[in-house]
């Protein structure tokens, strides 16, 4: 049997369209030098997100980041993951 006390303890329903503020978070894109990763990094950066792209070679990541612009940084994969709040793995299926 349910009492009114049980209903009173439920938190209010959240509006599904109310999104959390993620503007201060750093997004890392591992595989950021590939087509998909580069596209994600570009779009996230254009939207105002802080983005770091990762690669097995830091130089390649830095070069891709410079091409993308918009404040995107490049780093070796481990550093990218360490410095990021959110990490997207955008590597080809064969790379798994």
Image (cartoon, rainbow, N blue to C red):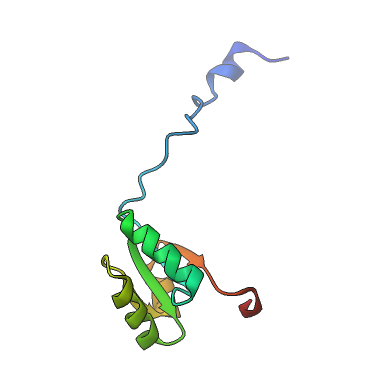
User: Left or right: where does residue 38 sit relative to residue 66?
Assistant: right
Q: Which image quarter: residue 7?
A: top right
Q: Residue at x 53, y 69 (%)?
A: 90
User: Left or right: where does residue 34 sit relative to residue 2?
Assistant: left
Between 79 and 29, the one lying in front of the other is 29
User: Left or right: where does residue 62 sit relative to residue 89?
Assistant: left
Q: On the rendered image, what quadrant is the N terminus found in?
A: top right
Residue situated furthest right in the rendering: 1
* 8 lies above or below 91: above
Q: Residue at x 61, y 79 (%)?
A: 95
Residue 89 x/y as whole percent: 53, 68
Residue 8 x/y as whole percent: 53, 18
Q: On the rendered image, what quadrant is the C terminus found in?
A: bottom right
Residue 54 x/y as whole percent: 42, 76
Q: Residue at x 44, y 63 (%)?
A: 40
Residue 58 x/y as whole percent: 37, 85
* 58 lies above or below 3: below
Q: Which image quarter: residue 79?
A: bottom left
Residue situated furthest top in the rendering: 4
* 76 lies above or below 2: below
Between 3 and 64, the one lying in front of the other is 64
* 34 lies above or below 87: below
């Amino acid at each position: 049997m349910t009492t009114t006390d049980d209903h009173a303890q439920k938190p209010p329903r959240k509006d599904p369209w109310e999104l959390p503020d993620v503007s201060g978070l750093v997004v890392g894109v591992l595989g950021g030098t590939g087509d998909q990763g580069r596209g994600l990094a570009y779009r996230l950066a254009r939207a105002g997100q802080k983005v770091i792209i990762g690669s097995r070679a830091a130089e390649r990541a830095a070069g891709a980041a410079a091409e993308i612009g918009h404040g995107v940084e490049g780093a070796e994969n481990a550093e990218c993951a360490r410095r990021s709040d959110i990490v997207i793995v955008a590597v080809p299926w064969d790379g798994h």
